[in-house]
Image: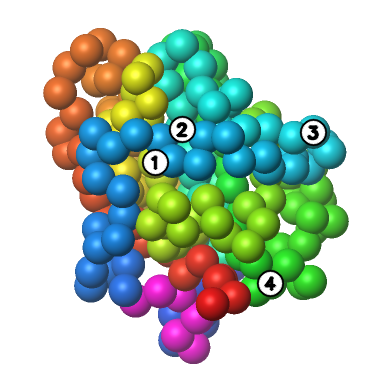
Amino acid sequence: MKFMRTALLATVCALGFFSLSSFLDAGEGEITIGQQLPMMAMDMVDVSGAEYTLRGLHQENGLLVIFSCNTCPFVLQWEDRYNDLYELCAKNNIGMVLVNSNEAKRSGDDSMAKMKEKSKAEGYKMPYVLDEDHVVADAFGAKTTPHVFLFNRDANLAYRGAIDDNGENKNEVNQAYLMNAINAMIAGEAISPDMTKSIGCSIKRTN
């Protein structure tokens, strides 16, 4: 399965379907460390039909927001970490949500129907919500799928970027950026690094 995903990734990269800008100008336009959680009151519909806001999802010790989608090869590589991250967040009273902002693919691979199929197939434990007209992604400055934003108990950005340094194999990760950030945040320690490059497919905006 990993071989197939790697082959698919190579094909997608060769065709230029992912965002090269994620390598070249990482950080440009993204919200900055310490900035307040944006769009807190925006209603977003989950695959269950329930409506959520980021304010409502934020728990005592913070909120983890991951911009994701259904078919991006980079998501396919990293999504086997999603439920592990959810368990770590739940243990530490941190909310977690996956946000699909691919408005340009809403009638295809990233329709709500496909999101429901994806959530069920992968056994997602966290809400998976639709960001209509990519307004939440725009407010965050989110660029890729996946793209991670971790907020602290005061709803200020504590970490942004990548999940870790090895999408190919979670058992061969050398730098577990996000898990390390969560653990440091809970311990009241400085997060280092607090910013990394988000590598993935570009969010498919309509404008």
Mark 4 or mark 1: name the one nearer the start of the chain.
4
Element type at mark 4: helix
The segment highlighted magenta reads 15-20
Compare residues 25 and 14 and report the one nearer the observer. 25
Left or right: where 114 falls relative to 94: right
Q: Which residue is mark 4?
A: 105
Q: Earlier in the sequence, mark 4 or mark 3?
A: 3
Q: CA distance from mark 3 to mark 1?
A: 22 Å
State the residue at coordinates (31%, 55%): 30
CA–CA distance between discs 4 and 2?
A: 24 Å
Task: Tell me, for residue 64, which label it has, or none.
Answer: 2
**Residue annotated with mark 3:** 50
Image position of 173 (left or right of 196): right
Query: What residue is shown with label 1?
Result: 149
Q: Give the spatial CA distance, label 2 vs label 1.
A: 6 Å
Q: Quadrant of the C terminus?
A: bottom right
Q: Callout 2 environment at 10 Å: few (<14), some (14 to 19), or many (20+)? A: many
Depth order, front residue of 7/201: 201
